[in-house]
Image: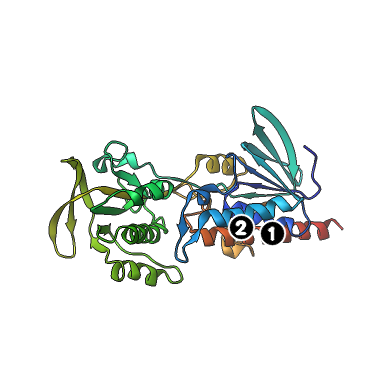
Amino acid sequence: MKMLNEGVLVIGGGVAGMQAAIDIAASGREVVLVDKERSLGGHVKEYGSLFPELTEGTLVVKQKAQIIKDNPKISVMLGSEVDRLTYADSNIKANFVSNGTINDQIFSAVVIATGFDNFEGKKYGEYGYDRYPGVITGIDFEHQEEAILKKPIKTAVFIKCVGSRDRSKGMPYCSKICCMYTAKQAAELKKAQPNAQVYVFYMDIRSNFKNGEEFVRSAMENQHIKYIRGRVGKVIPTNGRLLIRAEDTLMGVPLELEADLVVLATAMVPRESTKSLATQLGIKLDSNGFISPIPMTESENPMILTKGVFYAGACGFPCDVKDAINQGSAAAAGVLGYLQFNRRAAN
């Protein structure tokens, strides 16, 4: 692979990384976009419709992938990983592993857009994920939506904050998007099967997105989805169905109901690969393992981490698709400003 003049490395081919690559290449600079998967799009390529406009996730990915394909300034490396980053004078050296082959390349700047992983639902054994038929995660719902909506369902239960806002065996933070995608999935189920009883168990409803409150309210009022404040204590297989034991904390009464489908809204958690790359460059992580940017009082660009290194998307903290794309653009702007400053300084 050739040495790039003011080339930029973008690590992660999700929507944040794709947008960063698109914006940087639009300036005429060469970009290498690397992802360990065999196709671009990250998690978004696996999603159905995206709240609140209900745009198809695959369409968003296809549009950006086509822009990348049409731009000769962007080189895409799929099925590849960056396992080491080191400083080389004023540049950054990246060690690539691709199909068992190792090679190095020098870049003037790097954008880390490594995304997130999904919390392991099996950690909540009381809900029976991976043991009881009919218990799935919200991500499973996205993957299997067409098949799920075709099955006859009398009652479905959505359980929010599985692994989020739980210091005992989950993560203490709110994963931000769960309230919204749960409302979306519950509404889609109700539209497909109007006679189904659909329940959502929640701690709080957090819909701090544009049109978010209206979106959730529509699921309640127009789709007649029943929201119950309280945690589910246990899911028990019984008579070919799933017995839900919970509590309505507003009414102060215990509840039992039988369901055919239980959907767990699991947390977004940081990836181990993010931690490894950050450690190599001396980048700080927060107490949960997400990237911790330089304080705003110390930098004009909120996406900068250290000299020549920027980040975008959910590797910094849980975010929705729009935020991830916007952060990709913000990181690109930071990279271009950094390179322009360095060029002026050199002259």
Number of marks drawn: 2
In the rendered image, residue 322, in percent from the top left (x then y), is placed at: 53, 62
**In the figure, 183 relative to 167: above or below?**
below
Q: Residue at x 65, y 43 (%)?
A: 34
Q: Label 1, on which residue?
A: 23
Residue furthest out toward the right: 347
In the rendered image, residue 51, in percent from the top left (x then y), is placed at: 45, 62
Q: Mark 2 falls on what kind of element?
A: helix
Q: Residue at x 33, y 64 (%)?
A: 205
Q: Label 1 crowding class (10 Å Cα cut-off): few <14, some 14-19, many 20+?
A: many
Q: Quarter holding the C terminus?
A: bottom right
Q: Nearer the viewer, residue 172 or 102?
A: 102
Q: Label 2 crowding class (10 Å Cα cut-off): few <14, some 14-19, many 20+?
A: many
Q: Nearer the viewer, residue 228 or 69?
A: 69
Q: How is the image coloured?
A: rainbow
Residue furthest out toward the left: 253
Residue 337 found in image quarter: bottom right
Determine the CA span between mark 2 and mark 1: 8 Å
Q: Label 2, on which residue?
A: 328
Q: Quarter holding the N terminus?
A: top right
In the rendered image, residue 177, in percent from the top left (x then y), is placed at: 42, 58
Q: Are marks 2 and 1 in contact (CB under 8 Å)?
A: yes
Q: Mark 1 falls on what kind of element?
A: helix
